[in-house]
Image: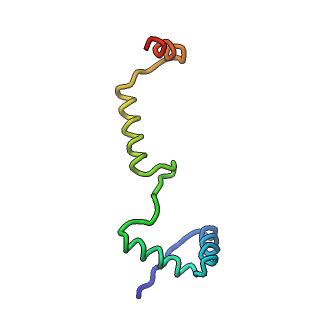
């Protein structure tokens, strides 16, 4: 056996303790279960999201598309100009 120490804010710890308690577990057992699953599956057991709510791949794709549009896209100086261009098509 080995020991792991982590620092976590009190609010998160209390919320996690409450969830684990409802499942009949203490925080230590819950964390052990999480680490065992990570080791077994060789990945985290949930979808990682960026602060914007996207997966890292989705966010990279949005950035690529935005950069492409900024480099190659047509720019309009007004909404009217945009609407005229749309009406032509």
Q: Is residue 59 above or below residue 38?
A: above
| Residue plotted at (54% across, 14% down) | 80
**Image mark count:** 0
What quarter of the picture does the C terminus occupy? top left
- Furthest residue in direction bottom, as rendered: 1
In the displayed structure image, the side of residue 51 where residue 19 appears, left or right: right
Q: Taking 32 as reference, is 25 left or right?
A: right
Residue at image coords 42%, 73%? 37
In the picture, which quadrant includes the N terminus? bottom left
Residue 25 image point, x, y percent = 58, 81
The one of 57 and 3 positioned closer to us in this rendering: 57
Q: In the picture shown, does residue 57 fall above or below 42?
A: above
In percent of width and height, residue 47 lies at 45, 58
Residue 43 screen position, x and y as percent: 38, 66
Asked if residue 35 lies left or right of residue 16, the reply is: left
Q: Establish if 61 lies above or below 83.
A: below
The correct choice, above or below, for 19 with respect to 59 in the image is below
Colour scheme shown: rainbow
Identity of the residue drawn at 39% across and 30% down = 69
The residue positioned 56% from the left and 78% from the top of the image is 27
| Residue 66 in which image quadrant | top left
* In this picture, residue 15 sits left or right of residue 31: right
Front residue of 17 and 24: 24
């Amino acid at each position: 056996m080995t020991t792991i120490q982590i620092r976590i804010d009190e609010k998160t710890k209390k919320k996690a303790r409450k969830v684990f308690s409802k499942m009949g577990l203490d925080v230590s057992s819950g964390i052990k279960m999480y680490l065992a699953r990570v080791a077994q599956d060789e990945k985290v057991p949930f979808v990682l999201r960026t602060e914007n709510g996207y997966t890292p791949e989705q966010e990279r794709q949005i950035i690529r598309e935005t950069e492409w549009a900024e480099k190659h896209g047509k720019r309009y100086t007004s909404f009217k100009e945009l609407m005229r261009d749309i009406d032509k098509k």
